Image (cartoon, grey):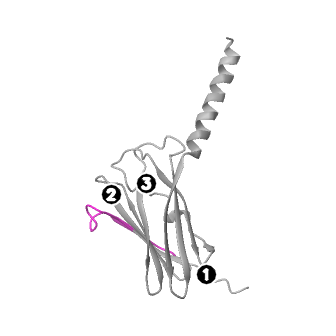
């Protein structure tokens, strides 16, 4: 076999492997029917990392090791209408295990439980109406020592 054929075969094999890795994903979902609002549904898409990201990246759900799975997308609908979720709300979450929607007086929250090791965490995304307002992630082992929080603010579209 010539060197050129070997290179072509290696390239084809690499492409085939990357396609199968990219498509290896699973979904975690939750749903609740809120009185006066309708059905609130959440779907968390989890995939293998696309490249060697290395253990130094900060991921919730790992013990400074490379994650096996990362959250790659989050879709939430309220009464059939999809709402916008910033990438920062889920981009550093790895090894998710369960999701649940909890009704609140101002809207709802989405809890994401991740990992079952020392890196275990709970991420809570709080929604007021149909907009994300806050994200709080805390270690399950040390919730008062290891946590982070984002507050989201949106300028209302008043038609200007």
Q: Is residue 84 left or right of residue 66?
A: right
Q: Spatial distance from mark 3 to mark 1, Cα to Cα?
A: 30 Å
Q: Residue at coordinates 26% horizontally, 61% vertically from top-left?
A: 141
Q: Which residues are magenta?
A: 137-153
- Residue on which the image places disc 3: 94
Question: Label 1's element?
Answer: loop
Label whose residue precedes the other's in the sequence (1 or 2): 2
Give the side of residue 2 with respect to residue 137, left or right. Answer: right
Identify the residue shown where x is 60% and y is 78%.
79
Q: Which quarter of the rendering shows the C terminus? A: bottom right
- Judged by depth in the image, the label closer to the viewer, 3 or 1, is 3
Give the residue pinned by disc 2: 120
From where the camera sits, is residue 153 visible? no
Residue 115: image quadrant is bottom left
Q: Are marks 3 and 2 in contact (CB under 8 Å)?
A: no
Determine the CA span between mark 3 and mark 2: 10 Å
Q: Residue 16 or 148: which is nearer the viewer?
A: 16
């Amino acid at each position: 076999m010539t060197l050129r054929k070997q290179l072509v075969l290696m390239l084809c094999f690499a492409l085939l492997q990357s396609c199968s890795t990219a498509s290896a994903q699973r979904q975690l979902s939750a749903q609740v029917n809120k009185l006066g609002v309708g059905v609130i549904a959440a779907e968390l898409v989890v995939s293998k990392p696309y490249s060697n990201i290395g253990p130094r990246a900060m991921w919730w759900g790992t013990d400074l090791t490379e994650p096996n799975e990362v959250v790659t997308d989050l879709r939430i609908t309220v009464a059939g209408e999809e709402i916008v979720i910033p990438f920062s709300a889920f981009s550093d979450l790895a090894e998710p295990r369960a999701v649940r929607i909890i009704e609140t007086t101002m809207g709802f929250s989405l809890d994401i439980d991740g990992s079952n090791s020392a890196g275990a965490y709970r991420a809570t995304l709080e929604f007021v109406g149909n907009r994300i307002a806050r994200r709080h992630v805390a270690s399950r082992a040390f919730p008062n020592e290891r946590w982070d929080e984002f507050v989201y603010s949106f300028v209302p579209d008043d038609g200007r």
